[in-house]
Each structure stands twice: as C-alpha cells, then as structure tokens.
Image (cartoon, rainbow, N blue to C red):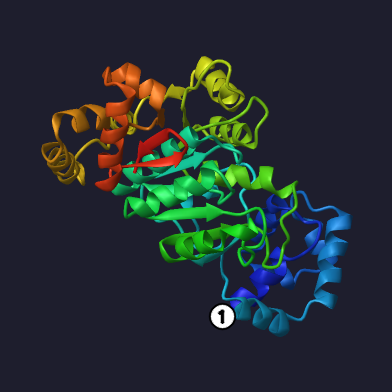
Amino acid sequence: MEEIRKYQYWLRCIQGVGNKKLKNLVEYCGSAKEVYGLTKSQLLQVQGIREIDADAILESKKQWHLEQEAEILEKTGISMITIEEEQFPVRLRYISDCPYALFYKGTLPKEEKTAAIVGARMCSSYGRAVALELGKKLAARGIGIISGMAAGIDSFGHWGAFAGGGRTYAVLGCGADICYPRGGRELYGRIEDCGGILSEYIPGTTPEPGRFPARNRLISALSDVVIIVEAKKRSGSLITADFALDQGKEIYAVPGRLDDALSGGCNELIRQGAGMITSAEQLLEELGFLAEADGPKEERQIKNIKNSLEKAELLVYSCFGLHARNMEELVKMTKIPASGLADVLVRLQNKGLIEEYYKNHYRRK
C-alpha cells in the first residue's frame, strides 16, 4: 500500500471526528500525513476542532498500527479513495457532508450521465416491471444506474441496467465488503463486475438502520436525476428525494392509483412539482437521450415479432406493456371470448412472448 494511504486510512478511522472536521484538517495541513504530525495546540488551531476532538486524534495515534491496519485493509480487496485525490467523484465534493473517503469494489462512476432508481422494498409486480424497464432503457443509452441494492425496486433497477448492457453502482449502508441484503449475493457479484459497490463506511461495518438514511444522500449526489418508482408517504426513498432537492437534482416519480399505498409518496412528489414518468421514452426525451443507441435495433426487433404473429395473437400481444393483465381485462380489451383467448395466450406463451406468473395473470416476457 502507498505510504500516504496508511495515513489516510488512519484519519478516516478516528472515532467521533466527522467528515466536515476531517475536511478542515486536510485543508489546513494539506494531507493526512501532515495531520498525523500535529501537536494538540496545533490541532486546536484548526477550524471546528475542539479539545475533545484533539484528544481523540492523539489517542488514536497511540492505538493505531499504521502498517498492520494497512495490511488488513489490503486483504479485504477493497479500494479506498479520499478527497485528497483528483479522482474522487466530483459530484460528491460539494455536498454539505461530503465523505472524507470512499471504499469500493469494482469501479467508481466516471463522468457518465447517471440516474438513481429507488423505491419500495415490498414493491408490486408493476413496480418491478417499471424499475426493470427504466433501468434497461436508460442503461442502453449509456446512463449509469445508481441505487442501494435493497430488495425490491432498487434491485430491479440494477437488474434492468444489466439487461440494457450498461453500468450500475450500488451505494451501501454498511461496509463494501458486506453483501446486504444477504440474499443478494448474485446481484452483488454482478454489480462489482458491471460497475461498482461503494460505501463511505470502513470495511466490516455492519448494516444498522441508522446508516441507510445517511447513504441516501450519496445515491442522490452521484446521480444527475433521481427516479422514485414506488414509495409510501413515509419512505426511505422520500429521504433520497429530499436530499436530491437540496442538492439541486431533478426528481421524477412514477404515478400510481389513488388508493394504492405504494403510490402515496410518488403521487405526493408529483403534486409538489416532481416530473411525472409516463414511459421510459418520455423520460429519455425530457433528459435529452432519446433514440439513437439502440432505438433502430429495438424497433426492428418489435417489427419482426409483430410480423410473425397472426391477427388474433397480435391483438392480444399488443395489450401487454408494463402492466400485467388478467383474463377478464384481456377479454374486455380484445373482445375475444374467453375460450378463444385462452388458446391465443397458450400460443403466445409457446413463442416465448408472454408468461403466466400466477393463475390467469399474464405479462410480457
């Protein structure tokens, strides 16, 4: 490990000294290594540093073994970058509580356009479909997808990015070496390969409830636009939206039914002035990213599918978009009797175009 890294890791691991004070120390001295050499009287000259902070810094020097701790960090396979370096993400530098250091696996977001896709953990099938579709369409245009790898909307936003052949980044509320939720091991590995796993917390930090609201400010800060797919009126996703508002980011929300609790937060955001998403294409158009990269190819694929279908099959297939449909809805939309409709649905399933994901409920595959 580089010599300077050992001092940077020491500085980041001092207990009780927050990001703003660490930033003040580095600005005053020029580097973590210079901070290490300060006396108590010199420390007290730094803006914001009180006696309790100076004592904590001096005590940490006694307890900390630079070489040993550096070796432990290196063995985790986790990379570290600090505000002392030019490569530190520009989007984070100017937020009010910029982390002194980031720990990551994979890569950091580059100067690419980025969008956060966040929402409810206990989401609906509609919400999952929307998150997948948005993640896919945006990633296909070269937009990096940022989220928190939580179950539900966050995870499906990441999976959508894979489907679009793009890059995606997860900001965790625990150490970057810890897969959370535990059931997301496959997703964790894929994100590391197709983007990066990021955290402001030192490796080994456990996922505690109080850490997740704080990480949301990083999700919004790393994104050019924040998209809320499903959220209750009291939701962690709305915390992300609040941070985005403070940071001057654009906020979009997916509208939902008036009586749907999962749409309460989104509908309220729209009432307050957030952009309303009616389709991935509409969002891309408003963001200035409509149409070139995969548009013609996708249009050819859709045309080939439609040309291969019989009239009744095309009529039924055209009823499927982001929404799943049940038999009753399809009968009303197509005017095809239930017996005939069942036969058409079987043919569409055999062609791999739709699937029955529970009894008499179908969705595009």
Which image quadrant is residue 260 in? top right
Task: State the image coordinates of residue 42 (x, y, percent, origin top left).
Answer: 79, 63
x 59%, y 22%: residue: 264
Label 1: which residue?
Answer: 2
Residue 220 shown left or right of residue 24 in the figure: left
Label 1: few (<14), some or many (≥20) within 10 Å?
few
Q: Residue furthest front?
A: 339
Front residue of 118/365: it is 365
Q: Indicate whether 53 appears above or below 70.
A: above
x and y, in percent, of residue 128 in the image: 47, 39
Quick check: can you spot residue 288? Answer: no
Q: Picture coordinates of residue 207 (x, y %)?
A: 71, 56
Q: Amino acid at mark 1?
A: Glu
Query: Which one is nearer the viewer's eye here, 245 or 35?
Result: 245
Residue 354 seen from this side: yes
Q: Nearer the viewer, residue 15 or 217?
A: 217
Residue at 71% over, 79% down: 69
Q: At numbered mark 1, what does the secondary structure look like: helix, strand or loop?
A: loop
Relative to 321, say whether 256 is above or below.
Answer: above
Residue at position x 48%, y 54% in the image = 169
Name the residue furthest left: 307
Residue 302 position within the rendered picture, expressed as x and y whole percent measured from the top left:
18, 39
Screen quadrant of the C terminus:
top left
